[in-house]
Amino acid sequence: MLKLDSISKSYNKGRVKAVDNISLEIKPGEIFGFLGPNGAGKTTTIKMIVGLLKPDNGSVTVGGINAWKEPLKAKSMISYVPDNPEVYDKLKGIEYLNFIADMYEISKDKREEKMNYYLEMFNIKDAIEDIVGSYSHGMKQKLVLTSALISEPDLFILDEPMVGLDPKSSFNLKAIMREMCDEGKTVFFSTHVLEVAEKICDRIAIISKGKIVAMGTMEELRSHAKEKESLENIFLELTE
Ligand SMILES: Nc1ncnc2c1ncn2[C@@H]1O[C@H](COP(=O)(O)OP(=O)(O)OP(=O)(O)O)[C@@H](O)[C@H]1O
């Protein structure tokens, strides 16, 4: 469903190599966790997948489509939740959701059904007629999550999704991710929360200084780390 083939990205005319020759392949039905310390290159990688930053080298393939050659086709399969939910402050919550649903060409019936389901789950239904500028950070995040889920994406990409969510919403989001994967969809998310990755990911990649330093199931990562048992130990050892 997602294939990164030797992608790299530098900033400041090559002075900062943020992502250095990363390759990975994720199959339908997988939850894939992307872990790494601050500044490791997680957000830069995600931005190259979703079409916000063009890789200097290499290719991004989504559902067999080259994401930089046929961006609209690739983007129609993706929903992306950034780490910092930026929503148009002057719109009402419902206007923002309809705007996103229009872009994905979602029918009226389907959008209503999905909106009701997720707005209730995230407990923001009562605020949907209010302008987004009045929302708290967590409410904006839940609105963006709802907007991302309405299109039932084949590839769901989230950058640090648990930050700012209360425990119930975080629990619900994890359940949604699992349900999506059971339906054959693919989830790719970055996180600093190692316990979340350990619990829900089918596979994990650890990125450090722009390079992938480990990738596999928890069992595979453990077997490479000899006696080191927890993901925290493996992470600390590999990202020193
Ligand atoms: N616009 C930019 N201009 C210059 N350097 C940048 C820019 N964006 C990111 N960087 C640098 O690229 C590197 C990778 O950054 P990136 O944001 O991808 O890391 P990250 O793993 O997402 O970090 P964090 O966990 O702190 O969000 C860092 O050294 C960062 O300072």
Image (cartoon, helix red, strand yellow):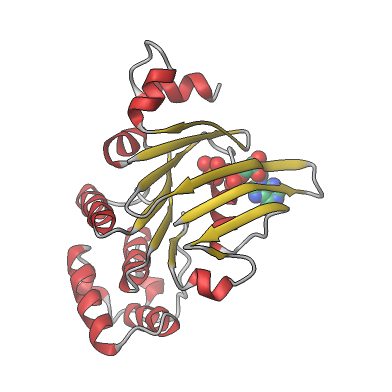
Q: Quadrant of residue 110?
A: bottom left
**Residue visible at 34% across and 21% down in the picture:** 230
**Residue visible at 36% across and 33% down in the picture:** 217
| Location of residue 164 in the rendering, given as x and y in whole percent from the top left corner | 35, 51
Would you place residue 21 above or below residue 60 in this image? Answer: above
Quadrant holding the N terminus: bottom left
Would you place residue 155 above or below residue 57 in this image? Answer: below
Q: How many dots with numbers?
A: 0
Would you place residue 192 above or below residue 93 in this image? Answer: above
Outermost residue toward the top? Answer: 227
Q: Nearer the viewer, residue 78 or 240?
A: 78
| Location of residue 136 in the rendering, given as x and y in whole percent from the top left corner | 35, 62
Q: Nearer the viewer, residue 110 or 140?
A: 110
Quadrant holding the C terminus: top right
Q: Taking 12 as reference, is 162 left or right?
A: left
| Location of residue 34 in the rendering, given as x and y in whole percent from the top left corner | 46, 42
Q: Taking 5 as reference, is 170 left or right?
A: left
Q: Nearer the viewer, residue 155 or 99?
A: 155
Would you place residue 102 above or below residue 10 in this image? Answer: below
